[in-house]
Amino acid sequence: MTKRIALIIHNQVYAEPELAQLKLPAADTAALAELLRDPMVGNFDEVELAVNSPAAELRQQVAGLFQRKHRHDELLLYIVGYLIVDEAGQLHLTTVDTHLDTLAETALSAAYLTDCMDRSFSRRQMLLLDGGCFRLNSIEWAADMHPTTVFKGRGYGRVVLTSVTGNDSTGEEEETSLTHHLVQALQTGAADADGDGQVEIKELYEYLRQQTRQTSLRVYGKHEHFILARNPYHFIPAQPIKWDLISGAILAPVTIIIIGGRADLRTAIGMAGLLLLMYALLYLAPD
């Protein structure tokens, strides 16, 4: 049986003094988790929220998200936090216990996350990243280390949507985050551009791109239709009652009885059943 499973990682507190000065816009990941659990919105079977967890614990949770999954299981990894580009140009996700001089041991490397995704049997993987970027000694990342490309891996059925600010400073916070706009989109159904009742990842990208300039999207593999959620305000209108068909189903057998008498009672009952069956089929058919 296909499952929908999500892991939300939210890092906002840091023991490292230099990282503690960094600011990100407020991100209500608790509200996002509730929306993903809601059967009328995300309809995820399992949603785990990890807030300010240490690196070792997060490694286990990420591995658990992708291990022992089936091909059609839909897996969502949602990350809020700061990325660090080390002196070798490699990308890491900061955690509550990250130290700048021991990134390999105290941060989540992009290589580790990509490897977990690559080893999973699931071909329906969604990675969404909302955060900022901090570069050690102003080191620039290589072109192939951009967040939308570094997580490509073997690229079988994977979509990567990121909103990473390039501002490393500790100045004023941005007013809103990608998470803020995502929560609004899911609550209101605003991202359902084609009105089909489903929020597909490309529709979500087009919506978020209008809200945050840093939003980028990459789809890897053959599967292009990744459904993140439902539009809670999309309803299929009820079919109008077709009274002409109902009256026909009732009057025709009555007429047979009146004309033919009791001898035709069996025929009339059979005719009524046939007409009611026709009515049921025509009722479901579009006008």
Image (cartoon, rainbow, N blue to C red):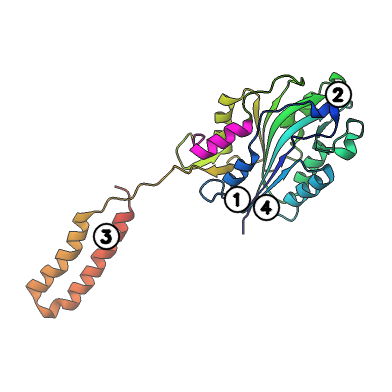
Of labels 4 and 1, earlier in sequence is 1
Work out which residue is located at the far bottom of the displayed protein and give it.
Answer: 263
Which dot marks residue 136? Answer: 2
The CA span between labels 2 and 1 is: 38 Å
The amino acid type found where label 4 is placed reads: Arg
The amino acid type found where label 2 is placed reads: Leu
Residue depicted at x 64% and y 29%: 177
Q: What's drawn in magenta, residue-wise?
A: 178-192
Q: Report the side of 256 relative to 205 (left or right).
A: left
The CA span between labels 4 and 2 is: 39 Å
The CA span between labels 2 and 3 is: 72 Å
Residue 85 in sight here: no
Residue depicted at x 70% and y 20%: 172
Q: Nearer the viewer, residue 160 or 233?
A: 233
The CA span between labels 4 and 1 is: 17 Å
Which dot marks residue 279? Answer: 3
The amino acid type found where label 3 is placed reads: Tyr
Identify residue for label 1. 44
Which dot marks residue 71? Answer: 4
